[in-house]
């Protein structure tokens, strides 16, 4: 389906005569997600996104500097639109985040994108930079806030190395995928329960309980 006609716009840094069309914005992101899902980052093209979204390349480049910018914006959109609401229960919230991260990774073949990011690091460093800024770091910050809230509530050991815990849960999908062993039923629960064991509040020696 073609996007709605694009209203008058101007390049970034100039004031547009009219605001950009939300329908066009959505059509572009939807097209980028579809092509990431079906063709992968390497085969995705700005021409293909423009054609699927029903917009001109000029309209596309008014919004995104190039493929790296658009693809990482689409990944950020996936994370935000499907973001689980926190419940206040650490195990429940970590499980919801890990499940969402896995769904998104499998939907857009993120492991292939990670490989491209690393392979092209010296040629197109902006791809890895944007992937970190828009995908990896925001997810890590979500985990950090959940841990901080759990520590403040007395539900997690304040002395635990939170960066190490974040590394464990953030890297769990990549490690399992690369192992080639597949994902058994209950995989997310196993990861989160292992993490929760590390976070259990410690009882001081000689203390009650």
Image: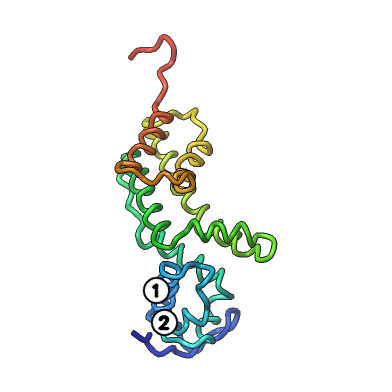
Label 1 crowd (10 A; few <14 / some 14-19 / many >=20): some
Report helix, strand or loop for mark 2.
helix
How far apart are labels 2 and 1 at the CA level? Answer: 8 Å
Q: Quadrant of the C terminus?
A: top left
Question: Which residue lies under the disc numbered 1?
Answer: 30
Q: Is residue 172 above or below residue 10?
A: above
Q: Residue at x 36, y 34 (%)?
A: 193
Question: Which residue lies under the disc numbered 2?
Answer: 53
Q: Nearer the viewer, residue 85 or 152?
A: 85
Q: Residue at x 39, y 33 (%)?
A: 194
Image coordinates of residue 10 in percent, x first then y, are: 55, 86
Q: Is residue 51 above or below residue 85?
A: below
Q: Nearer the viewer, residue 43 or 92?
A: 43
For residue 14, side relative to residue 148 (left or right):
right
Label 2 crowd (10 A; few <14 / some 14-19 / many >=20): many
Mark 2 near mark 1, Cβ–Cβ under 8 Å?
yes
- Quarter location, residue 207: top left
Mark sitting earlier along the chain (2/1): 1
Q: Residue furthest front?
A: 180
Image coordinates of residue 197 in percent, x first then y, are: 39, 29
Q: Quadrant of the N terminus?
A: bottom left
Q: Residue at x 41, y 9 (%)?
A: 206
- Quarter location, residue 133: bottom right
């Amino acid at each position: 389906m073609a996007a709605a006609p694009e209203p008058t716009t101007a390049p970034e840094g100039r004031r547009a005569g009219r605001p950009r069309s939300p329908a066009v914005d959505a059509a572009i992101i939807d097209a980028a997600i579809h092509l990431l899902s079906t063709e992968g980052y390497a085969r995705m093209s700005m021409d293909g996104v423009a054609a699927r979204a029903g917009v001109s390349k000029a309209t596309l480049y008014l919004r995104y500097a190039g493929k790296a910018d658009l693809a990482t914006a689409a990944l950020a959109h996936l994370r935000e639109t499907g973001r689980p609401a926190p419940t206040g229960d650490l195990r429940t919230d970590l499980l919801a985040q890990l499940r969402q991260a896995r769904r998104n990774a499998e939907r857009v073949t993120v492991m292939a994108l990670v490989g491209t990011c690393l392979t092209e690091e010296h040629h197109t460093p902006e791809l890895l930079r944007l992937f970190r800024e828009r995908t990896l770091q925001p997810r890590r910050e979500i985990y950090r806030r959940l841990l901080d809230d759990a520590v403040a509530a007395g539900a997690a050991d304040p002395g635990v190395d939170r960066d190490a815990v974040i590394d464990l849960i953030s890297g769990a999908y990549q490690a399992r995928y690369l192992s080639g062993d597949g994902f058994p039923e209950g995989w997310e629960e196993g990861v989160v329960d292992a993490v929760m064991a590390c976070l259990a509040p410690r009882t001081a020696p000689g203390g009650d309980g």
